[in-house]
Image: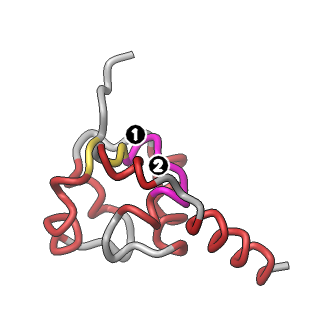
Amino acid sequence: MKIIRILFLVLCLSFASLNANAEPVNINKADVIVLAERIKGVGPKLAKSIVMYRKKHGPFKSVDELQKVKGIGSKLVEKNRKELTVGSLKK
């Protein structure tokens, strides 16, 4: 079953839209596939950790808060900063 999930994820990543790279990734809304595809240095496992952290602690207030996720450090955030956003936090 685990292999089927991995193959499905790889397949989804293969068919991801090329147009998706036009705008920054909203780390408060992106799913595992988008996070893994668009954030340099983040694979499926770390992308899942981001989503789980977000579900448990609520939306990120800044891109820097991404460092609170185990496995993500300041270098990874700095490398991707221009490609990331938290979007509008207003409700």
Q: Position of residue 17 (x, y in %)?
A: 50, 52
Pointer 1 and pointer 2: residues touching (CB < 8 Å)? yes
The tag earlier along the polypeptide, 1 or 2, is: 2
Q: How is the image coloured?
A: secondary structure
- Above or below, comparing residue 17 to residue 28 in the picture: below
Quick check: 43 left or right of 72? right
Q: Quadrant of the N terminus?
A: bottom right
Q: Position of residue 56 (x, y in %)?
A: 52, 49
Determine the image quadrant of residue 69.
bottom left
Q: Residue at x 26, y 50 (%)?
A: 84
Foreground residue among 2 and 60: 2
Q: Which residue is mark 2?
A: 54
Foreground residue among 36 and 58: 36
Q: Label 2 neighbourhood size at 10 Å, few (<14), some (14-19), many (20+)?
A: some
Q: Residue at x 36, y 43 (%)?
A: 26
Q: Which residue is mark 1?
A: 59
- Above or below, comparing residue 7 to residue 38 in the picture: below
Three-letter code for the amino acid on which mark 2 is drawn: Arg
Three-letter code for the amino acid on which mark 1 is drawn: Pro
Q: Label 1 neighbourhood size at 10 Å, few (<14), some (14-19), many (20+)?
A: some
Query: Which segment did they paint magenta?
Result: 27-34
Q: Residue at x 54, y 57 (%)?
A: 16
Q: Residue at x 53, y 75 (%)?
A: 45
Q: Main secondary structure of the magenta part?
A: loop
Determine the image quadrant of residue 48.
bottom right
Secondary element type, mark 2: helix
